[in-house]
Every structure is written in structure tokens, then in C-alpha cells.
Amino acid sequence: MLLRAGLILTGLVLQACALSNKAYVYSCSNGQYTAPKGEAASISTTTTRLLLAQRLGLSQYHNLEDATEASVQILNSFGGMQEPIFLDENRERRTEKFLAIIENVDQPADIMPEKSILTFMIDNPPSASQNRRFAIDLLLQDQHRRLKDTSLCTLEIAEAKMLRGGINSERNRREPCALEATHPEFLKGDNTIEQLRYLISMGAAVQDSTTILHISLLEGLTKRNKTQYSEATGSLKSFLRNFLGHPKKDSTIILMPPQTQNYKRTSASPYGTYSSPSHLLDQHRRQVETPLTSPDASTKDSPASTTKPHQAPPPLRGVIPVCHTSANDCVASTNNCSGHGAPYKRFIDPTSKESRDCYACNCTTTVETNKLGKKTTQWGGPACQKKDVSVPFWLLSGFSILLLALVTWSIGLLFSIGEEVLPSVIGAGVGGSRPQK
């Protein structure tokens, strides 16, 4: 009897140790949890990478060379809703994507909302730093994907202590990008709870967005710290409720277990190999900014850069009004003054009962430096979209008129030769001939 009890206790301990070294994944598509057939399976980190890439629409950056038949079946079962090849322009916008990797989760029930269904588990999950790097790479891959077809609107959190990632969306040409507005200073601090609440409000302000976050709010917290632990888990649960079960969101939540002191990294690249997003963004930036570089210069390796490439604003069409009701309206209607100025309050209409303001574009001068020297360009127009060519016009016109007058005078001078009448006294000083003797 004692032997049987000892064996049962040992088995329970071994099972608990095995489960403590697994990450829990919850996925939800169109408001419904993705439930497995039977018990939740355990997959490798490489298969997890392929699965997350498919759910986020980033499969083009990840190859299936090392995928097994079992991995392909998992991708088909849990890959989420896929976009059709040919999209209808009149259809509603596609499902928004959301991925959150939460570190140091001991009990998933403390964070996940009620009635949550476990989709699958991850064997030997990577470290927190490797998970953070992988989340940032996925975010950069999504930026590169959007830059190939449309302009990018993004909000990146790169200076916070326990929150990394951001939100990507398509830029609306008629309205300014809400994600690129002036953000509060607490996004750079360690107030993770306020940062998560702010992300909820910013995510609701855009459409067709992709949100990828790495959250380490529970790092260093245990149930012994009752007040801090309950506040942190309660905030995370409230945050996840905004995404799980949403009818227009494709959400994936990964709960990473606490790392023990004896934890050892299984590999330097536990998620496998994939296309480097930093290299892709840097290559796209070079193609946009320097399209006439030589082939030798384009093949040289350059340092990784995540700087967003400059997108030229689309040309403005139709009659552009000079006055706008607000500065934001001026920016949206004139493509930020075509990048050649800034809105300012021109005057207040005294005839209007509401005393509406008139905001217009204050055009500036651009100076370009090249081998020949400096070239100054003055911009004008209601949207600063027109070059001021008055000085070159008057120089060219004056020189042309002067040259035409000079040629006319020269031709007239040539025709006047030989037409003048000789004077009548031209022979007065010539004596007559004398008679010969």
C-alpha cells in the first residue's frame, strides 16, 4: 500500500514538473475559441513559429522545408481564417490580428477569462529575451508586408520596461494617422497597466490592424505578493477580454511559464530560421530613397535599420480650398501641406456668427545641396503643391525679349546698308579739265 502511494505521488510530481515546462496557447477566431479534438497537443517551437506566422498572415517570410506531416495538419487545424486570393474592394475589412506573449505565468486561470479553451501547448518554451526578439521580428515583418502594397501607420513601444511591440495599420489618405499622434509620456515608463489601457483605445481608433505584444508584467511577482499580483493579473484579464471573443478579431494568447534558476537555453535560435525583417525594411528603404544607386552599391551589406521609409504623398486633385476649419482638417485635406509647410491660423472670419477660424498652409523654402551648389525652391499654392517659378520666369522672359530686340536691330542695320542718298556737293572740290595748247 505504501509502495503504491509512493508511486502515485512520484507520478504526480513528475507530471507537475513536465507541465510546468510547457507554454499554454489560446486562440480565438471570429468570436469562437479554436478547440482541439480531444486533449490539447504539445508542439515544438518551430511549428509554433509557422502557426503564428500563418495566423498573422506572414507565411511568406517563413518556409516549410523542415515541416513534418504532423506540423502541416496542425497548421490546417489551428491556422485561423485565411484571406482569399482575390479581395473584393466593396467587402468589409478583413479580420484584425492580435498576438500577446505573456511571461512568468504560473496559473493560466489567474489571467485567462472564464470559459477559455486551451488550444495547444509548446514544449520547452524559449527564454523571455528570445520571445521578445521573436515578437519584435513578427511586428517588423508585418510592417514590411504592408509597405509593399500601401502606406504604413504604426505605433511602436520600444522604450517601456515590461511591454514591447506595437500596432500596425494601413494609412488613410483622407485622415491623419491616429497611431502617429502625440503619445503620452507614460508609454516610455514602467506603468504597464496604463500602457495596456492606452493600447486598447488606440486599437479601437484604427481598422485592419495587427497588434503584437510581449508582456512581462508578472516578472518577479508571485502569489506571496497578494496586492501586486492580484492587481497585475486582474489588469491582464481585463485587457484580454477586449480581444478574446471579439467577432472581428483573430486573437492568439501565449502564456509562458516561470523560468527556474536551472533553466538552460536549448538553442540560440529556438524558433528556427526565417527572413530577417530588419534586412527587408532596410532594403525597402534603400529602394525608396535611392532608386538610382549602382548595382555594386545595392549588393553591399548595410547595418540593420528599422527606420520607416519616406512615402511620397499622393497628388492632390480638384480644387483645393484655401481655408480649413481646423489644423487637423488642413493636414488631412492637403497631405500635411504636401510636406512643404505647416498649417497656421490665418484669420478669424468676422462675418460668421460662430467666428470660425481659417487655417491655411504656411509654405516654406526647401534647400537642396548637390555637386553644383545649393538649389533653393520656394513653394506656393493652397496646399504648397506648386513651385514658385516667378524668378526663373522673369529671368528667362527678360533675356528672351532682350535677345529678340538685339536680333531685330541687327537685321534692320544690315538692310539699311546702301539705302542712304549721297550728298549733292560730292563733286564740288573737283576741278574741270584744261584745254590743251
Image (cartoon, grey):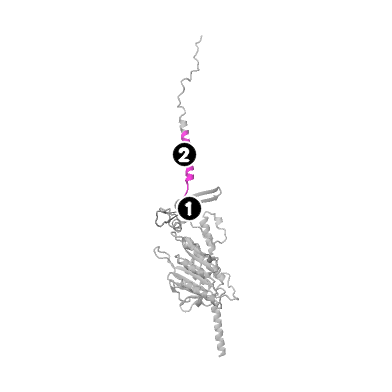
| Frontmost residue, 179 versus 346 | 346
Question: Which stretch did the figure color magenta?
Answer: 385-409
Q: Position of residue 98 (x, y in %)?
A: 48, 69
Circle 1: residue type: Asn
| Frontmost residue, 29 versus 164 | 164
Q: Residue furthest bottom?
A: 1
Q: 10 Å neighbourhood of mark 1: few (<14), some, or many (≥20)? A: some
| Frontmost residue, 162 versus 131 | 162
Q: Position of residue 145 (x, y in %)?
A: 48, 63
Is residue 65 at least partly visible in the picture?
no
Q: Position of residue 259 (x, y in %)?
A: 57, 75
Give the structural element (helix, strand or loop) at label 1. Answer: strand
Q: Earlier in the sequence, mark 1 or mark 2?
A: 1
Q: Position of residue 39 (x, y in %)?
A: 48, 79
The reply to whether the magenta stretch includes residue 401 is yes
Give the structural element (helix, strand or loop) at label 2. Answer: helix
Residue 401 disc label:
2
Kindly identify which residue carries mark 1.
362
Which of discs 1 and 2 lies nearer the camera? The answer is 1
Residue sitting at 49 percent across and 45 percent down? 391
Instruction: Find the distance from the CA under tag 1 to the CA under tag 2.
Output: 34 Å
The reply to whether the magenta stretch includes residue 35 is no
Circle 2: residue type: Ile
| Frontmost residue, 419 versus 78 | 419
